[in-house]
Image (cartoon, grey):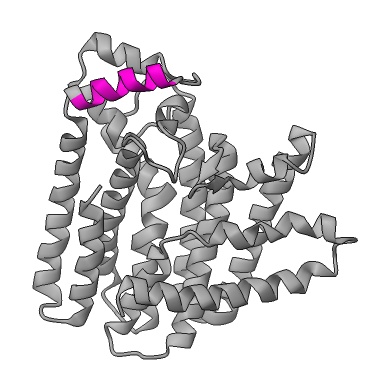
């Protein structure tokens, strides 16, 4: 089952699961207006690519297991952890748009006239998603090593977010190694590494270390691509040049530091914390193109993915698993 076919199947299951969870808490709210705090979850979850549950499914299915209903429930855990992380990440980054719709806290800003209230409510919605994901993990994975992988995943994504906030408030650029660690913990590990490990563990794989190393490479490439997309013009699913304005320290920022002249990097640094107008964005975009930053970063992504494909060739030659995984890798190569 390729990613698109799986997404169609998964979205139906996720919609049903989410509806049942919303109904289970409706009685706690005194009126529909208050309950509407949660109903934005429906459109908010609609736009995901479903990489995370697909990784769980692919790695599980490699061993011949065909319990699609069960592994879909496991995938829901992975996806809802992602939703929890996005809601909190948008609050921390003060993001306004995601996937062409308002971020959760921005949506609630239209309901409350007190900033503290709508930020608090958005944070608590994220917390509720977190607890439901954890409850589902306990239901479908208790007694398995995969349950511990989920706990590690949650721990690491929070630490990664803490590092991200710290880095964004540090004027001095961090090292490549520090940025890579932050990106892995904040995003890469729960997007590819841990979902692959969960699927492998539930299928009875004993060599999880090898699976972990493979997933980490793909996760790093994914995050690098995601950071690169923040610079690409006419991109609609994330605030344009938000990483620069929020001073999110990324591999793209590191590439700019390495290749820009001192004067031009000072221009870039001066955008930290600023609300850039179109003229300022165009000036930065020109610098980005002049120094061929996209090509530099894509070359790094390509090296990582070449290594992943070589690993596949050595481990799972001529399996349908490799074919579908290579489709995902092809998506990561493109910008």
Picture quadrant of residue 23: bottom right
Q: Residue furthest right?
A: 30
Number of numbered tags placed on the structure image: 0
Q: Is residue 160 left or right of residue 89?
A: left
Say if the magenta span includes residue 287: yes
Q: Is residue 156 visible?
A: yes
Picture quadrant of residue 232: top left
Foreground residue, 74 or 158?
74
Foreground residue, 139 or 224?
224
Residue 7 vertical placement versus 48 (above, below) = below
Foreground residue, 96 or 83?
96
Residue 248 rendering spot, x and y as whole percentages:
42, 32
Residue 221 vertical placement versus 313 (above, below) = above
Residue at screen point 45% across, 25% down: 245
Say if the magenta span includes residue 58: no
Residue at screen point 12% across, 56% down: 306
Residue 131 rendering spot, x and y as whole percentages:
65, 63
| Majority secondary structure in the magenta region | helix
Q: Is residue 197 visible?
A: no
Residue 331 rendering spot, x and y as whole percentages:
25, 58
Which contiguous range is marked in magenta?
278-289
Which quadrant does the N terminus fall into?
bottom left
Residue at screen point 48% across, 66% down: 78
Q: Is residue 314 left or right of residue 110?
A: left
Residue 222 rendering spot, x and y as whole percentages:
30, 52
Q: Is residue 332 left or right of residue 193?
A: left
Residue 170 vertical placement versus 78 (above, below) = above
């Amino acid at each position: 089952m390729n990613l698109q076919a799986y997404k169609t199947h998964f979205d139906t299951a996720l919609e049903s699961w989410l509806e049942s969870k919303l109904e289970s808490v409706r009685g706690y709210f005194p009126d529909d207006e208050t309950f509407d705090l949660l109903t934005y979850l429906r459109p908010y979850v609609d736009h995901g690519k479903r990489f995370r549950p697909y990784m769980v499914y692919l790695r599980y299915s490699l061993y011949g297991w065909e319990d699609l209903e069960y592994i879909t429930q496991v995938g829901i855990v992975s996806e809802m952890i992602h939703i929890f992380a996005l809601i909190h990440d948008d609050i921390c980054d003060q993001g306004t748009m995601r996937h062409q719709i308002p971020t959760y806290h921005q949506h609630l800003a239209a309901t409350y006239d007190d900033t503290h209230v709508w930020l608090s409510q958005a944070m608590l919605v994220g917390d509720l998603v977190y607890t439901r994901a954890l409850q589902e993990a306990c239901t479908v994975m208790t007694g398995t090593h995969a349950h511990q992988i989920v706990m590690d995943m949650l721990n690491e994504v929070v630490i990664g977010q803490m590092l991200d906030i710290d880095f964004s408030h540090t004027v001095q650029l961090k090292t490549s190694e520090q940025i890579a660690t932050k990106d892995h913990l904040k995003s890469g590990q729960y997007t590819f590494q841990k979902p692959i490990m969960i699927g492998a563990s539930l299928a009875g794989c004993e060599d999880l270390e090898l699976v972990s190393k493979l997933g980490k490479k793909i996760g790093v490439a994914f995050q690098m691509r995601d950071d690169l997309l923040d610079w690409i013009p006419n991109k609609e699913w994330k605030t344009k040049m938000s990483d620069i304005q929020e001073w999110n320290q990324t591999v793209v920022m590191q590439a700019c530091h390495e290749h820009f002249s001192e004067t031009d990097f000072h221009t870039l640094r001066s955008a930290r914390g600023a609300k850039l107008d179109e003229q300022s964005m165009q000036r930065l975009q020109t610098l980005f193109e002049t120094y061929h930053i996209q090509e530099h970063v894509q070359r790094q992504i390509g090296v990582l993915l070449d290594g992943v494909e070589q690993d596949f060739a050595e481990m799972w030659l001529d399996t349908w698993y490799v074919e579908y995984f290579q489709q995902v890798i092809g998506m990561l190569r493109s910008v």
